[in-house]
Image (tube, rainbow, N blue to C red):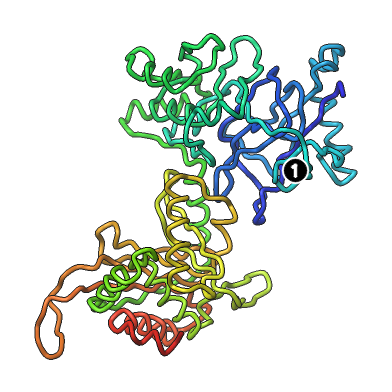
Amino acid sequence: MSAGQVFALPDLGEGLTEAEIVEWHVGVGDEVEVDQHVVTVETAKAAVDVPCPYAGRVVTLHGDTGQMLEVGQPLITVADATAAQASPAADAPEAAGAEQYRSEERAGTTASEDDSGSGAVLIGYGTGAGGRRRRRAGRRRAPAYGSGGGQLPVAQVPETEESVRETAQPAATRHGAVKVISPLVRRLALDAGLDLASIRPASPDGVIRRADVVEASAEPAAATAAAPTPSAPARAAQTRAEQTGDTRIPLTGVRRVIADKLSTSRREIPDATTWVDADATELMAVKDALKRARPDDGVGVLALMARIVVAGLRRHPELNSSVDTAAGEIVQHSAIHLGFAAQSPRGLVVPVVKDAGEMTTAQLAAALRDLTAAAREGSLSPAQLTGGTFTLNNYGVFGVDGSTPIINHPEAAMLGVGRIIDRPWAHEGQLALRKVTQLSFTFDHRVCDGGTAGGFLRFVADCVEQPSVLLAHL
């Protein structure tokens, strides 16, 4: 195997066709094991740690930090360590590795079909019984997220560093490489703005641990990570920024994906917005009553609004749809997959509650809690962020009353809920302070007219004002 095994970017699922390299966890010359995570890539939906199905010495990294790769393109070339030492061809593997990739591509695969040692679950290579899975970290090639200053989302962070020590061994890295076992240590270093290469480990084995990062973060001399040498266009942009005083932030990663998606929505969807104020006093009373009667269910306002939205979409199924522009058809979806806007370390994301139409209110509440927690941890998978058919946007948590949001393409509608506050309200012929909210509804005018949109919004408002109305539709 002197030419090296070429591992291509695997299919990450959910129809995703490309990914951006966020951070390499190994460098050329490092030794890797089967299923070791070698790179973090960012798709249109989530950050994913990619395991390599081969063991050996890294001879080629097919891409730099920030580069986009399509599924099926070469990602990393790994040569058997003994073969690489015996053959001078291993020192120049790129041409041979590319030829092997082309041969495997013609044969219909870029991964060894008999590689039973890989236990990783990524589309693109098999899952066998395999040997013991161990994650070993090599050296970092470049700071994550370029100069944008964003934090690297970690898909899985062990609860304690000690739990990692019990299941992993120090990386067998070449001289000068950074030895880090725990993803938690990497995250701590990132949050502190430290370059791992500048941290001196206290332990004899040379592994950087939590205590080393904490100590280094207290030293002013080590508080700033070394910046990579910028390219000529980057230097020119930096010079312009210095002259004008402007701040230039690269549009990369999730921000680039969001920008592309929102631009597509604005370009393709003729949207319209309608809104209504609603007295949510009774809805809040129901929430409080459920909290007293069934505290373990954790049913809050968002779960109750999700319950109402599901009922409304059953009455108006044309809003649970999307437009197939290529076929010139409106597709009404049989299942309700309810997305909801949530903030995460990677920015605004829309986790999806699959088959929300089949859930009870308590089940909806549990699903919303789990997905919200995953969003805050930055551990949402692509499957949890795709496939939505309708979006619920509770922007009231930001202390605002109304909004005209951009529809989450390719969906056809979005309901927004403003803050619920005390306002003067005419109630039973008297002026009183009531819990009032503003509901806004943005819809694709291609799938329905104003009558349908108004009917849906009025139904939602009626259920907010009189939650007992829901009983007739459950």
Q: Residue at x 82, y 17 (%)?
A: 90
Q: Residue at x 47, y 50 (%)?
A: 374
Q: Would you identify the image quadrant in which residue 246 lies? A: top left
The image quadrant where one finds the N terminus is top right
Residue 216 in percent (x, y) is at: 39, 16
Q: Residue at x 20, y 73 (%)?
A: 435
Q: Residue furthest left?
A: 431
Residue 233 in percent (x, y) is at: 51, 28
Q: Nearer the viewer, residue 435 or 6?
A: 435
Q: Residues within 10 Å of mark 1 (few under 14, many from 20)?
A: some
Q: Would you identify the image quadrant in which residue 455 lies? A: bottom left
Above or below: residue 122 compared with residue 287: above
Residue 377 in percent (x, y) is at: 45, 45
Tag count: 1
Helix, strand or loop status at disc 1: loop
Circle 1 residue: 72
Q: Residue at x 66, y 30 (%)?
A: 134
Position of residue 280 in the picture relative to residue 241 (left or right) = left
Amino acid type for the residue under numbered disc 1: Gly
